[in-house]
Amino acid sequence: MNNWLYEGESITHIDDFPPNAYGFIYKITYNGKSYIGKKNLYSNRNVKLGKKELALLKEERKQQGKRGKTPTKKLITKESDWVKYYSSNPILKEAAKLYSNDMVREILHICYNKKELTYFETKYQFQYGVLENPNKFYNDNILGKFFTKDFGYLN
């Protein structure tokens, strides 16, 4: 597997990121074309509480004098699949199955919250001109609002 590179250093473990890092902006290059995107370092999901856990929570809330409905789910945070991630782009995802060693995965920017992650993703996509250079980039849209096909003179 091909490691992520950040400022010339190989990133292989979550501890290689600064404390409180939320995600990163990346550029993956394959066959002379690149893709710029974002990736969260962690994922959240709601998990239903088991019977024992629910009973303990009800008892705890009762002792604390809390009223109202007892939550039936809890939020679980776990490390995302960032180590093995090869973009959301279908062409790159498919190519990664056979040619991942031919891909260069670079971290362009580390972000510390969700808004920052979205902001810097769009900033880099506009800065690199991903929609204006379809021969250089796999990206075909930015934020689902701006599309390569909207640039009629490129077609």
Image (tube, rainbow, N blue to C red):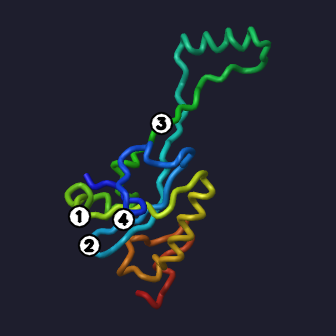
Residue 28: mark: 4
N-term-proximal mark, 2 vs 3:
2
Describe the element under mark 2 as helix, strand or loop.
loop
N-term-proximal mark, 1 vs 4:
4
- Label 2 crowd bin: few (<14), some (14–19), many (20+), radius 10 Å: few
- Residue lying farthest bottom? 153
N-term-proximal mark, 3 vs 1:
3
Above or below, 52 against 70 in this view is: above
Instruction: Tell me what residue is drawn at x 44 percent, y 67 percent.
Output: 36
Q: Quadrant location of residue 3?
A: bottom left
The Cα atoms of the two marked residues, 4 and 2, are separated by 10 Å
Above or below, 36 against 23 in this view is: below
The residue beneath circle 2 is 31
Q: Amino acid at mark 2?
A: Asn
The residue beneath circle 1 is 102
- Label 3 crowd bin: few (<14), some (14–19), many (20+), radius 10 Å: few
